[in-house]
Image (cartoon, rainbow, N blue to C red):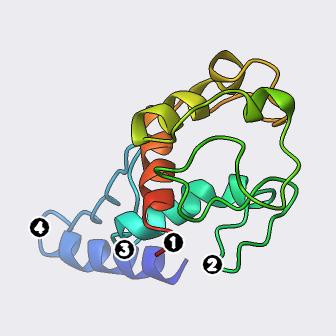
Amino acid sequence: MIRKAIIIAAALAIGACGETPPQPEAAPQLSANANPSPVISMADSGKAAFAMCSSCHPVSSDGQHGMGPNLADILGAESGTRDGFAYSDAMQSANIIWTEERLDAFLADPYAIVPGTAMAFPGEPNAEKRALIVSYLGSQGD
């Protein structure tokens, strides 16, 4: 309100001199995808993308499981073999070595990769988000 009053007063003063009043600067327009916050690191982005997974899956070095198995050091591990977790028969018999590619495919459509999996997650359609999750998991562990 004060800024508007100042602009009006300036316009009147300049108008009296026969000059064109100054125009207020337009606010910069941000696209729908613009991120006005500071740059976020890839690790922070991966951790944020993994947040939905962390409600079931810990990634702690203590090996403790949650509702889902602990995913620390998951890359290179065989499906359904973590000690202390009660895996579904489907996951135990899947015989998958979790590479980045296999984990990405599983995150995209868990039921297509491991039919009968007990994981209550329909899949993540966004390839960029899956890549962040896979990268984050690759950084968790030894």
Q: Are marks 2 and 1 in contact (CB under 8 Å)?
A: yes
What's the distance in space between the residues labelled 1 and 3, CA to CA?
28 Å
Residue 38 got which mark?
3
> In the picture shown, does residue 38 fall above or below 130?
below
Q: Which residue is mark 2?
A: 61
Q: Which residue is mark 1?
A: 141
Q: Nearer the viewer, mark 4 or mark 2?
A: 2
What's the distance in space between the residues labelled 4 and 2, CA to CA?
74 Å
Q: Nearer the viewer, mark 2 or mark 3?
A: 2
> In the picture shown, does residue 9 fall above or below 44?
below
What residue appears at the point 51 percent right and 38 percent down from the top-left corner? 97
What residue appears at the point 80 percent right and 28 percent down from the top-left corner? 117
> x, y percentage for residue 141?
51, 72
Crowd band around label 2 with a 10 angstrom C-alpha radius: few (<14), some (14–19), many (20+): few
Say whether disc 3 or disc 4 marks the residue closer to the N-terminus: 4
Q: Label 1 sits on what residue type?
A: Gly
Say whether disc 1 or disc 4 marks the residue closer to the N-terminus: 4
